[in-house]
Amino acid sequence: MTTSRVPPRITAGPPATAADLLASQERNRLAGEALPRLRAAALGWRNAAGALMAGLVAFGLVKGRTDVGQLAEPWAAGVGSLLLLALVCGALGAYLLNRAAHGSLAPPPLGARSTRSAAEHLEVGDGLRALRCGIGMTLACTAFLVGAVASTWYGPSAKPPAVELSTPATGKLCGTVAGMRDGKLLLKTGGTTVDVATAALTQLRTVDDCP
C-alpha cells in the first residue's frame, strides 16, 4: 500500500525589517556598479599593459645584438620561437583586455524573459574571466619577450671569437684561433693560417670583429 506524498507548502516569510531593506538596496547598488567598475579596471590594465609593451619595444631594455642571425643556430631558433610566442600572447592579451573593457562584439541575447540586470550579470562574469585571462597573457608576453632579449645578450655567437695579437716578428694580427701546435698558435687571418709562437706574444686580446 502506497501513500501519496503531500507537496510542500510555500508560505510567506516574516516581514522584512529595515535592515533587510537596507541590505537589499546595497546589493542592488553593488550589482548596478559591478559592470562600470569592471570596465574601468579593464581600461586601467589595458593602458598599463600598453605602456609596458611600448617601453620594452621602444627602449629595448639594454641594447644587445640587433640581428638574430649573429647567434648560433640553435639559439637563433629559440629566440625566434620566443618572439613568436610573445606575439601570440600579446595579441590574445590585447584582445581579451579590450573585450573586458568594451564588451563582446556579439549582440546580447534577447528574449521575452531577459532583463537588463540579468544581461549585465552575465556580462560581468564573462568580462571578469576575459580580464583575468588577458592579464595572464600580457604577463606571459612580457616573460617571453624578456627571455628573447636575454638570449640575444648571452647566446653564443655564430662566428668564432676573434683575437688581436702582436709579436715583434709579425706585428699586429687579427683573426680567429684555429688551434695550437707545438707551442704555436694557429691564427686564421686574411684567408691564410699563420703560426704564431706563444712565447713571442706581446699583446693578446679578444675583439668583436677584425677590421
Image (tube, rainbow, N blue to C red):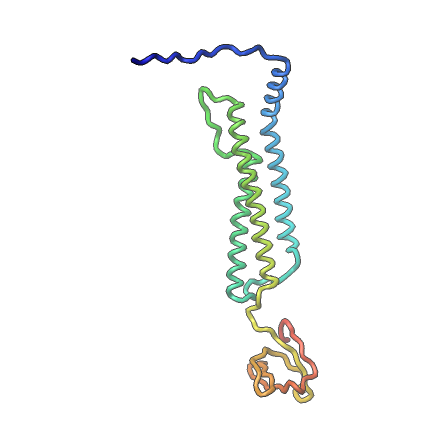
Q: Nearer the viewer, residue 70 or 21?
A: 21
Residue situated furthest left in the rendering: 1
Q: Is residue 120 above or below residue 14?
A: below
Q: Is residue 5 above or below residue 192?
A: above
At 61% from the left and 26% from the top, the residue drawn is 33
Q: Is residue 159 above or below residue 119?
A: below
- Across and down, in percent, residue 29 comes to 61, 22
- Across and down, in percent, residue 18 comes to 64, 13
Residue 203, by quadrant, is bottom right
Q: Is residue 47 above or below residue 142?
A: above
* Tally of numbered discs: 0
At 69% from the left and 88% from the top, the residue drawn is 168
- Across and down, in percent, residue 86 comes to 54, 51
Q: Can you say which quadrant of the picture contains the N terminus?
A: top left
Q: Nearer the viewer, residue 6 or 200?
A: 6
At 48% from the left and 30% from the top, the residue drawn is 107
Q: Is residue 108 left or right of residue 197?
A: left
Q: Can you say which quadrant of the picture contains the C terminus?
A: bottom right
Residue situated furthest front in the rendering: 1
Q: Nearer the viewer, residue 133 or 115?
A: 133
- Across and down, in percent, residue 161 comes to 60, 73
At 51% from the left and 61% from the top, the residue drawn is 77
